[in-house]
Image (cartoon, helix red, strand yellow):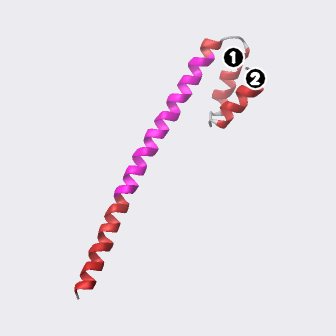
Amino acid sequence: MDQDKLKKILSDTGCRKEEAESIIKAYGCGEIKEALHKTRKDRCRLMDELHENGRKIDRIDFLIRIMEKEIKQTENVKGAL
């Protein structure tokens, strides 16, 4: 794979500039195992972010359910009057 393609892929994935440069340098020097290790490390970072965002979504969904429940309760009280 040429370095321009590697750089584009890393950029598309949101790889941080310093990490991308390190991966590209290792790859360009023929240290493919080192480049692979660094790439896997960045993948782990992305997975951590994914899981954290999943937890945030769960929290906001919980908040939405509470608010929807309160709206229904308020409407039921108004409808009973």
C-alpha separation, residue under disc 2 versus residue under disc 1: 8 Å
Labels 2 and 1: the sequence-earlier one: 2
- Residue 6 at x, y percent in the picture: 71, 26
Q: Residue furthest bottom?
A: 81
Q: Which residues are magenta?
A: 35-62
**Above or below 16: residue 23:** above
* Quadrant hosting residue 7: top right
The image quadrant of residue 19 is: top right
Residue at point 63%, 34% (across, down): 16
Q: For the residue labelled by badge 2, is the local secondary structure a helix, a strand or a loop?
A: helix
Q: Is residue 18 magenta?
A: no
Residue 76 lies, with reference to residue 66, above or below; the image says: below
Q: Residue at x 48, y 40 (%)?
A: 50
Badges 2 and 1: C-beta atoms under 8 Å apart? yes
Where does residue 34 sit, x and y in percent of width and height? Answer: 61, 14
Residue 32 horizontal side relative to residue 81, left or right:
right
9 vs 65, left or right, is right
What x and y, as percent, mark residue 67? 34, 67
Q: Quadrant of the N terminus?
A: top right
Secondary element at image label 1: helix
What residue would you read off at disc 1?
A: 27
Task: Please tell me how crowded label 2 is: few (under 14), some (14-19), or many (20+) other residues with Cα within 10 Å.
Answer: few
Residue type for callout 1: Tyr
Observer-nearest residue: 31 or 12?
12
Residue named by callout 2 = 3
* Residue 7, numbered circle: none
